[in-house]
Amino acid sequence: MRRFVHVLCGGVIGLLGSLGDPLAARAALDAQVVTIGGEVRERYEFRANADFNKNAADTLSFIGSRIRLHLNYEVTPDITALIQIQDARLFGGEVSTASNDNLLDLHQGYVMVKNVGPTSLTIGRQELAFGDHRLVGHFGWSNIGRSFDGLRVAYLAAPVRVDFWGVSPKVYGTNTGAAPAFTPSNWEHQEFYGIYASIKTTPVTVEPYVMYLLDGGDAGELNAAGTALLSPIKAPAARGQSRVTVGVRADGKAASEAIDVAVEGAYQLGSMDARGTTPKTDISAYAVALKAGYTAPAGIKPRIGIEYDRASGDKDRADDTLGTFENLFPTNHPFYGYMDYVGWRNMQDVRLSFSAKPSTSTGVSLDYHRFSLAEKDDNWYAASGAIFQTTPANNTESDLGQEIDLVGYMMVKEKIRIEAGYGRFIPGDYMDVNVPAATDASDWVYLQVGTSF
């Protein structure tokens, strides 16, 4: 590793030398303005009855590998440059031991200019994450994660921070590198703009925001795999949409930080147009999230919590208004069940949770979820945003089911994190009535080992 680092640093020095004085570049390196780090993460996952039918051969068992290496260079005290490369793949997923499926990519690569008055500027490929990631997150659980290409400006004047951005989602083409059952949606040809403010006061932080998603995709366009990009007008991330999201999030603590509370609400408006195949549709959708918990200050610091999440659905398929909430570019995984069967679209979720930290290096959590549709006429959407189950006409049931998740972690040698989890999803009346053959419970297990340096 040390030799590799020297080679990499030498390459940086050579590049700088080609642009200016190589002796000055070495002096900058000696001043410790170059930092190198990375991450190695391996995760095994097993899922049985992903379609709730034990008679179907749909067992998933795979190992996802993610390796990241970054180099951060402080050009001046006010200018820094970062490059982060990533290799993400499934074990055994390549054609042979002598092949390479182009799984090595640039995850982040940007230049940041700080202290331009009270603002900073970041341009290039970068991760974005705001609030608790319900609408915009880096999706770190994924084997690939998420990054954007574009510009971000941050205004800093304590206790206020305001971020402005204009970006396009990074597209990985045919390189999904994710669980086969949850292939991510194609986000090509989208533009994403927003303003997100954070006002920190004691004991509450308030975060208002406005986001604008413009999708100019055309029905005749094809993606890198040669597949048409057009999606049905009632599906999330359908082509040809212009969607504005206005919302606010607030969180805070009380009683010597033993009580924590968080609330978020968002409303969406705009229009969708599938380029001639479907009449233009107006958007009117909303979502809310309410969460509270109590943490005992002594011992293993047990926390008990309750949470309610709701996202609107489309209550009338025949009218010209689309009521399905689109939760944009989220990190869904921690919120609506670790098994990722439900996303923040046409749903209700009542969550009870318990967690504890037996030591500074160990932790455990137990969650219970009760899921239902917000509107019986709309579909069941997975965490990926795709339709998990198409709802038939005249559906009368909204009970999607229950999920129980048990997760624990342990730190070894300070830098190595071992994490394991088990989830069980029990389908409800919705599947009993609409898909009688798919009423068996689904089980999911994972074991993850990771380290960062």
Image (cartoon, grey):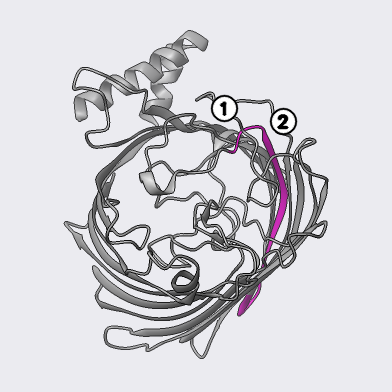
Q: Position of residue 254 (x, y in %)?
A: 54, 87
The N terminus - image quarter: top left
Magenta residues? 187-204
Q: Earlier in the sequence, mark 1 or mark 2?
A: 2
Q: Amino acid at mark 2?
A: Asp
Vertical placement of residue 96 versus 271, above or below: above
Which residue is labeled 2 in the image? 218
Residue 258 position, x and y percent, is 46, 87
Give the residue type that dot 1 points to: Asn
Question: Which residue shows up at 44% across the image and 60% down it?
Answer: 333
* Above or below 98: residue 427: below
Left or right: 427 with respect to 225?
Answer: left
Question: Where's the C terminus, which quadrant?
Answer: top left
Mark 1 element type: loop
Q: Which residue is mark 1?
A: 223
Under tag 2, what secondary structure? loop
3 or 266: nearer the eye?
Answer: 266
- Looking at this view, is 174 or 355 the one in front? 174
* Disc 2 residue crowd, few under 14, some 14–19, many 20+, Cα 10 Å: some
User: In the picture, residue 443 is in which quadrant?
Assistant: bottom left
Q: Position of residue 96 (x, y in %)?
A: 21, 22
Task: Identify which residue, 114 or 311, lies in the foreground.
Answer: 311
Rounded to the nearest angstrom, the CA distance separating label 1 from label 2 is: 11 Å
